[in-house]
Image: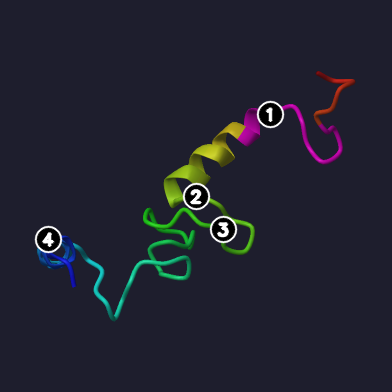
Amino acid sequence: MSRLETMSEEFRKKLIAKNDFTSNDEYNVSHKNAISDGDDHGKGENGGLIGSATDIAARNKMLVKNKFSANNPYDDATA
């Protein structure tokens, strides 16, 4: 292992100590904090939901005011 790799590993261990994620619970696409499941952590798609709870609520508020829908889609004719 090079000196740079050794130093990098030491810094990584120090930073991981401040991190909620461990080698047994690494952050990845299937981690509970990566998936949009109704909390404010995840942003990834889950069953058609995309974004955190705050994102979804804000989007739903905007959709109420939107004049376009499945029956009245936004296309070149309505642009």
Tell me the crowding category of disc 1: few under 14, some 14 to 19, or many 20 or more residues within 10 angstroms, Cα based: few
Name which residue type carries label 3. Answer: Glu
Q: CA distance from mark 4 to mark 1?
A: 49 Å
Lower position in the chain sequence, tag 3 or tag 2: 3
Residue at (57, 63) in percent of width and height: 46
In front of the other: 15 or 67: 15
Q: Name the spot of residue 73 as percent of width and height, x first.
A: 83, 33
Q: Position of residue 24 (x, y in %)?
A: 29, 81
Quarter of the image with the C terminus is top right
Q: Give SS at disc 4.
A: helix
User: Residue 51 or 3: which is nearer the viewer?
Assistant: 3
User: Is the residue under label 4 in contact with that under label 3 (CB below 8 Å)?
Assistant: no
What's the residue at 35%, 67% (across, down)? 27
Q: In the rendered structure, does residue 47 fall within the stretch colored magenta?
A: no
**CA separation in Å, label 3 and label 2:** 7 Å
Between 27 and 36, the one nearer to me in the picture: 27
Query: Secondary structure under badge 2?
Result: loop
What quarter of the picture does the N terminus occupy? bottom left
Read off the residue under disc 2. Answer: 51
Report the Cα–Cα distance between label 3 and label 1: 23 Å
Circle 4 is placed at which residue position? 11
Mark found first going from the N terminus, 3 or 4: 4
Residue 48 to residue 21: above or below: above
Residue highlighted by disc 1: 66
Q: Amino acid at mark 4?
A: Phe
The residue carrying pointer 2 sits among few (fewer than 14), some (14 to 19) or many (20 or more) residues within 10 Å by Cα, namely: many
Give, as a single range, the part of the protein colored magenta.
63-73
Decide which of tag 4 and tag 1 comes sooner along the chain. 4
CB contact under 8 Å: marks 4 and 1: no
